[in-house]
Image (tube, grey):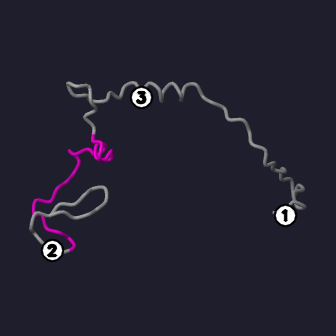
Amino acid sequence: MLPAVLLKRRGEKVRSNAKRPKVVDDKESDDEESTAEKQEIPLDENGEDLRSRTCPYLDTINRNMLDFDFEKLCSVSLSHLNVYACLVCGKYYQ
């Protein structure tokens, strides 16, 4: 709308562009903190992080839910020679 047309039309309220102050709910922030505390980082005997450093997304995959096709046939080239694909970038490896 044009600035000159900011008058009330048929009982509509004039909207202001002023931002309202954000209300922080203490319950939500407490829940976020408690879930962060519950998640423990797996460490080895040296105290180093065991999670993948090269691809952080691989640790988020539930490998029990994956359904691998035992026929190992590439859907692009129809090759059966050791076909593997990266779950992140989609590149094919042989």
Q: Observer-nearest residue: 88 or 25?
A: 88
Q: CA distance from mark 2 to mark 1?
A: 60 Å
Q: Observer-nearest residue: 24 or 11?
A: 24
Residue with the mark numbered 3: 36
The tag on residue 47 is none
The N terminus - image quarter: bottom right
Q: Residue at x 83, y 50 (%)?
A: 13
Residue segment shown in magenta: 52-76
Give the vertical position of 24 relative to 57 (above or below).
above
Confirm or deny contact between disc 3 and disc 1 (CB under 8 A).
Answer: no
Residue with the mark numbered 2: 78
Where's residue 84, x and y in %? 17, 60
Q: Residues within 10 Å of mark 1 (few under 14, many from 20)?
A: few
Q: Is residue 2 left or right of residue 39?
A: right
Q: Residue at x 33, y 47 (%)?
A: 57
Q: CA distance from mark 3 to mark 1?
A: 47 Å
